[in-house]
């Protein structure tokens, strides 16, 4: 796509590539030729105009227009925009994409492969940690009246939940929320002494940016773990900024979530040590409350 001014005409999401695959066998002969050409030349098509595609598929421009209508687009222009959007995230999943790992690898090789990537990213994150920022964030969290963890999407919301799970044990009222509307409302109730802790691997979700801006105007502290130099890191009081490249293996869960969990553990450990005796008593109470569930009195994870 070379036309930078093209915009999606409406907000309806249409997976054009999936539509083409579904309809290719049932389309009229001419339109089927267009579908076959596109499915065999995904990367080339994104740079072609209507006439280019018509000539390559040996059909008329009108046939290309009818094809666009058949896959749910209002025009060829609409098709180009939606096709480019769909292709941007789909190429690594479409033929002739290559697997990074041999599917015939042994289980031992699979284990080594996954753990090696996790260790690599953890090492990379260690080299990006700024002790002064960690110290400042530990100070803010240690003195918090209340901590609310906000995340949007699968990984970020799960890490936010883990943040609340770690910090309530330290005697600090902690909670997590992933609903954007609720985040905005809750942010408006925060005040001096409260902390909004945002988690986002991209640092771009509008819900988080709006919530942080709301909390800032009421003098609550705002902190985050996010991508380096993202919009989110620019509007919080303190940010742990991480640049973590994603591997190309489409079948392996992202290892960056492990890094984010490690950052939560670093902060929780720092806060626990800083709060000292009050935290120790809180942990003792939690462990005691679990005795009727688990009679084990040896050192063990608390409540896990």
Image: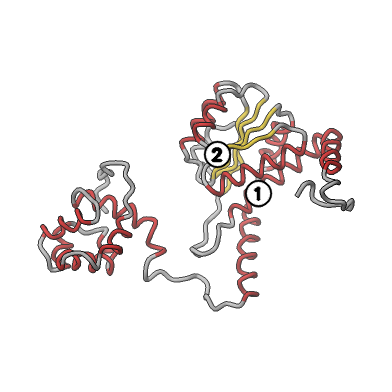
Query: Residue 143: where, in percent of width, then height?
Result: 73, 29
Q: Earlier in the sequence, mark 1 or mark 2?
A: 2
Structural crowding at the residue carrying mark 1, measured as other residues with C-alpha within 10 Å and reported as few (<14), some (14–19) or many (≥20): some
Is 109 left, or right, of 99 in this rendering?
Answer: right
Q: Quadrant of the N terminus?
A: bottom left
Alpha carbon separation for disc pair 1 and 2: 17 Å
Q: Which SS class for mark 2?
A: loop
When the figure is inspected, residue 219 is found, relative to residue 130, above or below; the finding is above
**What x and y, as percent, mark residue 41?**
27, 67
Give the number of the mark in front: 1 or 2. 2
Q: Tell whether 142 sits left or right of 53.
A: right
Residue 50 in the image: above or below residue 185: below
**Which residue is identified by label 2?**
178
Q: Residue at x 61, y 65 (%)?
A: 114
Name the residue that disc number 1 marks.
261
| Residue ID at (71%, 31%) | 173
Q: Position of residue 186 (x, y in %)?
A: 57, 27
């Amino acid at each position: 796509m070379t036309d930078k001014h093209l915009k999606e005409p409406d907000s309806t999401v249409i997976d054009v590539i999936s539509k083409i695959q579904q309809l290719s066998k049932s389309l009229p002969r001419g339109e089927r030729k267009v579908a076959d050409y596109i499915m065999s030349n995904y990367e080339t098509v994104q740079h072609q105009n209507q006439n280019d595609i018509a000539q390559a598929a040996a059909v008329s421009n009108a046939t290309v227009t009818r094809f666009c209508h058949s896959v749910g687009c209002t025009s060829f222009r609409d098709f180009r925009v939606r096709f480019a959007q769909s292709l941007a995230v789909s190429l690594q999943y479409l033929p002739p994409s290559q697997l990074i790992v041999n599917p015939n690898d042994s289980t031992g090789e699979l284990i080594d492969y996954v753990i090696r990537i996790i260790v690599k990213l953890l090492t990379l994150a260690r080299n990006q940690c700024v002790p002064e920022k960690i110290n400042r964030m530990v100070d803010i969290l240690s003195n918090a009246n209340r901590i609310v963890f906000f995340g949007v999407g699968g990984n970020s919301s799960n890490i936010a939940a883990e943040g609340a799970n770690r910090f309530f044990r330290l005697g600090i009222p902690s909670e997590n929320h992933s609903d954007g509307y609720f985040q905005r409302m809750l942010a408006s109730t925060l005040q001096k002494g409260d902390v909004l802790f945002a988690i986002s691997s991209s640092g771009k979700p509008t819900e988080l940016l709006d919530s942080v801006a709301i909390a800032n105007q009421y003098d609550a502290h705002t902190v985050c773990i996010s991508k380096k130099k993202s919009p989110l890191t620019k509007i919080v009081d303190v940010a742990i900024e991480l640049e973590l490249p994603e591997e190309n293996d489409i079948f392996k869960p992202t290892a960056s979530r492990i890094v984010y969990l490690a950052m939560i553990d670093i902060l929780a450990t720092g806060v626990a040590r800083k709060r000292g005796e009050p935290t120790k008593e809180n942990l003792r109470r939690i462990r005691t409350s679990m005795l009727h569930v688990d009679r084990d009195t040896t050192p063990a994870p608390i409540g896990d």
